[in-house]
Image (spheres, rainbow, N blue to C red):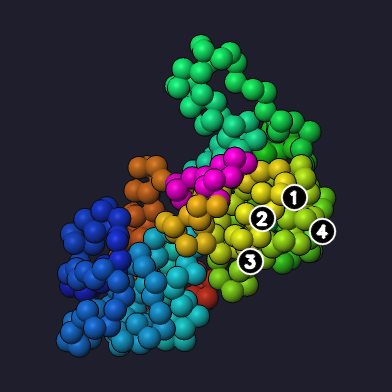
């Protein structure tokens, strides 16, 4: 089937640019969630491409007998059963690289905000307290003299590490295997890295392998001067353990852009004075989200036109058009 005649399903709250380009390039069908009952059998049989902005289960993949490609909006694709898709010879793609710098920049901003309380200082000024009460209180925390640990040294993790290195911080990292292309200190165990650093930046994918791996033991190892920054997935952090650790000062502070049950943030977390919270905005600039949207659609165009996908996920990296 040619790309011009392919039927592409828009699943979930897709980015407007994805919708605009898919509607221009393909015959588009939309559903709010990946619910089999939302589509007739005739429509399901015609769908060959899927632009995903919601959870895509194995059952839903199996309900689309002629599906060829799932293009995910985002680097993390834990909401898609990519392993099952691979067994069906369905290509799955994501959007790496185009958001790495934006997320890394935001991570540095979140870290500085957490340490130096910059949002609170601005609120102090805007409330007229500078004029009425004098200068904002000195912050007890600083970036100076710290050591950073990166949990996950993929594309984004490396971009974060390079920025922190430019600030003069020693860099440690924890990954399953040591990278031969960096001189940073590698720790085969997360708890050992947490003991060796006082900034822990979490930038690993979600899923069963990383769920609640930042737990009470890791926070205890990070220690009373420790600062946790999470820009990966909320599922990676044991949220009740983090709330307890912040409340009793097991660690000094946390800066979070992701949460376990988004957009629902626990009130106990919002009430903590040593938590700096953002509403999952690490990649949320117009330029970066447009670049991500373009990569979603470009992957659909390439695969459905019989050419290789631009950014296949690891489970599908070995696919070619003959096998797919």
Magenta segment, principal secondary structure?
loop
Q: Is residue 53 left or right of residue 273?
A: left
Disc ID at residue 235: none
Mark 4 or 1: the one toward you: 1
Disc 1 element: loop
Contact, mark 2 vs mark 1 (Cβ under 8 Å): yes
Badge 4 vs badge 1, beta-carbon distance below 8 Å = no
| 38 or 127: nearer the viewer | 127
Pick whichever, 290 or 318, lies toward us: 290
Disc 4 residue crowd, few under 14, some 14–19, many 20+, Cα 10 Å? some
Which of the two discs, 3 and 4, sits closer to the camera? 3
Q: Quadrant of residue 13?
A: bottom left
First in sequence: mark 4 vs mark 2:
4
Dot 4 falls on a residue whose secondary structure is helix
Asked if the stretch drawn in magenta spans residue 19, the answer is no
Identify the residue at image location x=50%, y=80%.
83
Residue designated by label 4: 192
**Quarter of the rendering occupied by the C terminus:** bottom left
| Distance between mark 2 and mark 3 Cα atoms | 14 Å
Residue 303 appears left or right of 29: right
Per the model, the C-alpha gap separating discs 3 and 4 is: 17 Å
Q: Label 2, label 1: how many angstroms apart (C-alpha)? A: 8 Å
The location of residue 220, given as percent across then percent down, is 77, 55
Tell me the CA gap for discs 1 and 3: 17 Å
Q: Which residue is mark 1?
A: 250
> Which of disc 3 and disc 2 is earlier in sequence?
3
Question: Label 2: which residue?
Answer: 244
Which disc number belongs to residue 212? 3
Quarter of the figure with residue 255: top right
Q: What is the span of residues highlighted in magenta in the rendered image? A: 269-281
């Amino acid at each position: 089937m040619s790309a011009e005649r392919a039927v592409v399903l828009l699943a979930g709250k897709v980015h407007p640019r994805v919708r605009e380009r898919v509607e221009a390039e393909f015959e588009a069908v939309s559903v709010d969630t990946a619910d089999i009952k939302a589509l007739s059998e005739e429509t399901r049989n015609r769908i060959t491409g899927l632009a995903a902005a919601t959870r895509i289960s194995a059952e839903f993949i199996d309900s689309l007998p002629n599906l060829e490609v799932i293009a995910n909006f985002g680097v993390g694709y834990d909401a898609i059963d990519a392993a099952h898709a691979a067994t069906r010879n369905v290509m799955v793609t994501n959007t790496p690289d185009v958001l790495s710098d934006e997320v890394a920049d935001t991570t540095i901003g979140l870290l500085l905000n957490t340490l130096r309380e910059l949002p609170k200082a601005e609120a102090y000024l805007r409330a007229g307290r500078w004029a009425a009460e004098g200068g904002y209180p000195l912050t007890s925390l600083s970036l100076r003299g710290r050591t950073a640990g990166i949990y996950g040294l993929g594309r984004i993790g490396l971009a974060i590490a390079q920025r922190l290195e430019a600030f003069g911080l020693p860099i440690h990292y924890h990954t399953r295997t040591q990278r031969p292309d960096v001189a940073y200190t590698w720790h085969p165990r997360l708890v050992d890295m947490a003991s060796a650093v006082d900034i822990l930046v979490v930038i690993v994918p979600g899923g069963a392998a990383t769920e609640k791996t930042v737990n009470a033991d890791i926070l205890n190892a990070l220690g009373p001067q420790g600062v946790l920054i999470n820009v990966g997935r909320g599922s990676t952090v044991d949220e009740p353990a983090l709330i307890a650790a912040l409340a009793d000062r097991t660690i000094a502070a946390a800066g979070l852009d992701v949460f376990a049950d988004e957009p629902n943030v626990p009130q106990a977390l919002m009430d903590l004075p040593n938590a700096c919270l953002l509403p999952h905005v690490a990649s949320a600039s117009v330029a970066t989200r447009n670049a991500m949207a373009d990569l979603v659609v470009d992957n659909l165009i390439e695969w459905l036109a019989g050419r290789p996908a631009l950014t296949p996920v690891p489970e599908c990296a070995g696919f070619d058009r003959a096998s797919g």
